Image (cartoon, rainbow, N blue to C red):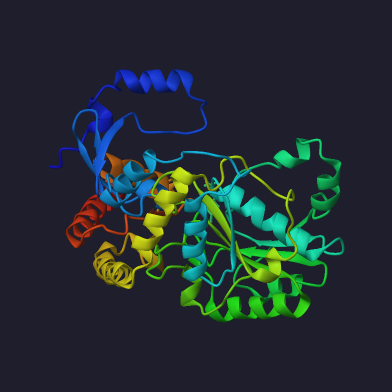
Amino acid sequence: MSPFASITQSAPPSDWVERAERVLAPTYARPARVFVSGEGSTLVDEDGRRYLDMTSGVAVNALGHGSPVVADALRDAADGLIHTSNLFHTRPAARLAELLVEHSFADRVFFCNSGAESVEGAIKFAIVHGGPQRKKVVAFRGSFHGRTLGALSSTDMPAHHSTFGQATHRTFAPFNDDAAIQEVDESTCAVIVEPIQGEGGVRSADPAWLGRLRQRCSEVGALLIFDEVQTGLGRTGKLWAHEWYDVTPDIMTVAKPLAGGLPMGAVLMTEAVAASLRPGLHATTFGGGPLVASVGARVVEHIAAGEFLADVRAKASFLREQLGALRPHVAEVRGKGLLVGLRLSLPGVEHPAKAVVSTAFDLGLLLVAARDDVVRLIPALNVTREELETAVERLALTLERVASER
Ligand SMILES: Cc1ncc(COP(=O)(O)O)c(C=O)c1O
């Protein structure tokens, strides 16, 4: 019997749970446990219970908890400049941008602080590049690009409103469907797409379709934006998920694992996109600060190494073989590399993903839901084979339990 069998039933919520629930905005539904430490793919709660973390902070902790790479980078950076603002140059931002350029299609980089902010930046750059005639942004059904709501629209900068307020026409086109290609026309400034939709249920773009989308964007002069906030930086076993597709964007958004758990985002772009930008057009106070950028540079150097990515691919194959054991409760294994989506088949279970995540938690396994019937395994990229094996064992137990309780 697992030591986690009855956490939620028998253990009273700690004082900290009550304190947190009293003062934090009620925007999240968290389990009644408090995490206090972690190492690699293990998180430890206040009572010393250990959980196998297959969430890695929703694809952020790519190097696991307590990573020496991140800790050393932080220690080294702590003695230097923490922040200067973007009024001035500092070395770490330049170094990190050099690394990103060296390891991608891009020529230039804009730094920000989150995934949503990188998407905002990407769309703004595409609007500027497209000029006043291009009012349309094409996005896809099932997409997820963040949750910000136009701070600029409440900012009293009329010149910016006239530049950016024009692209008001959002079209949601069907993913992996050629009807979407027809939506892209001469009035389109940007097409934004995740090579693998993460939050939308771990749905991979069809390679040929993505190629046709690229071709259509080039024909009509629209920019293709790949949102690699979740898929980027080694998650799929290549540095960028789009490398599996052999299709290159004009702009790419990156965030989650970029600075080893510190908040950081980036917009990568070609020289042609950068050529339409000028000082004052877009800015952010914290973006690319020396502390985060120093850590980011170490993380990117570490992940971009060929042997690291080969290891991710090998472990991903190992995991995917193991997952075959979860049939019939898993109808489909989706995704690429260590971004794994399991489409559940649990007839009679209401909100199956939620039920599985909650039961797995009780059994000491941390998972993330994606839509109602898909759970994700997004382990740290340096997870071990033994940990993956244990995760699958606990998942099998979880599925049996959820199925038997329906
Ligand atoms: C593909 C994608 N884009 C953007 C975002 C938003 O990132 P953030 O939560 O850092 O704003 C996410 C978050 O999950 C994401 O998966």
Report the residue at 24% width, 32% height from top. Answer: 7
Above or below residue 333? Residue 35 is above
Depth order, front residue of 194/30: 194
Q: Left or right of 94: which side holds 191?
A: right
* Above or below 380: residue 27: above
Q: Residue at x 40, y 33 (%)?
A: 30
Identity of the residue drawn at 65% across and 66% down: 174
**Where on the picture, by quarter, is residue 217?**
bottom right
Residue 246: x %, y % from top left: 52, 80
250 sits left or right of 370 in the view? right
Residue 342 visible in this rendered orientation of the protein? no
| Residue 226 image position (x, y, % from top left) | 58, 65
Q: On the rendered image, what quadrant is the C terminus found in? A: top left
x%, y% of residue 39? 23, 44
Please indicate whether residue 287 sits to the left or right of residue 370 in the image. Answer: right
In which quarter of the view is residue 17 placed? top left
Quadrant in which the N terminus appears:
top left
**Number of on-image labels:** 0
- Which residue, as the protein is rendered here, is positioned at the far left? 1
Rendered position, 171 above or below 291: below
In the image, residue 147 sits, relative to residue 278, either above or below, namely: above
Q: Position of residue 201 (x, y in %)?
A: 48, 58
Along the viewing direction, whichever of 148 and 101 lies nearer the viewer: 101
The answer to whether any part of residue 228 appears in the image is yes
